[in-house]
Amino acid sequence: MAQVPDESDDGSERGVELEAEVDQLKEAVVSHAVVDQAIGMVVALGRVTPEQGWEVLKEVSQHTNIKLRHVAELILIWGRDGRMPSEIRVELEEALERLGPTQIPGSPQE
């Protein structure tokens, strides 16, 4: 005899799927906000356009092999307490230098 699917199982499965989707969307919104804030810092620091700020973040991420969101988080931490890993600082300066001369505050003078 064939088993009739229990409609309550379908509803609970769908509920779990929707909860997972909502969690993913919340994470995406937070990630997007972090990246947008970091772009704003790069724009102000390097006197570049938002599009160029986005490109700078992508370059830093690619050259350091660090996820873009994590690079953005590190830039925001730097904005709060002045600390930035040297590899991020070097890549950020180089990416901004390609767009025009910029000296990141607190970086060693050459």
Image: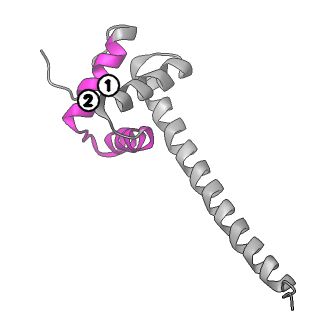
Residue 61 x, y percent position in the rendering: 37, 32
Callout 1 amino acid: Leu
Which residue is located at x 35 percent, y 18 percent?
95
Closer to us: 38 or 2: 2
Which residue is located at x 59 percent, y 49 percent?
28
What residue is shown with label 1?
A: 92
Q: Quadrant of the N terminus?
A: bottom right
What residue is shown with label 2?
A: 89
Q: Is residue 71 above or below residue 60?
A: below
**Magenta residue span:** 68-97
Which residue is located at x 31 percent, y 27 percent?
63
Which SS class for mark 2?
A: helix
Question: Is any atom of residue 104 visible in this view?
Answer: no
Can you name the residue that lies furthest to the left here?
110
Q: Magenta segment: does it hold 1?
A: no
Position of 90 compared to 33: left or right? left
Most frequent secondary structure within the magenta stretch: helix
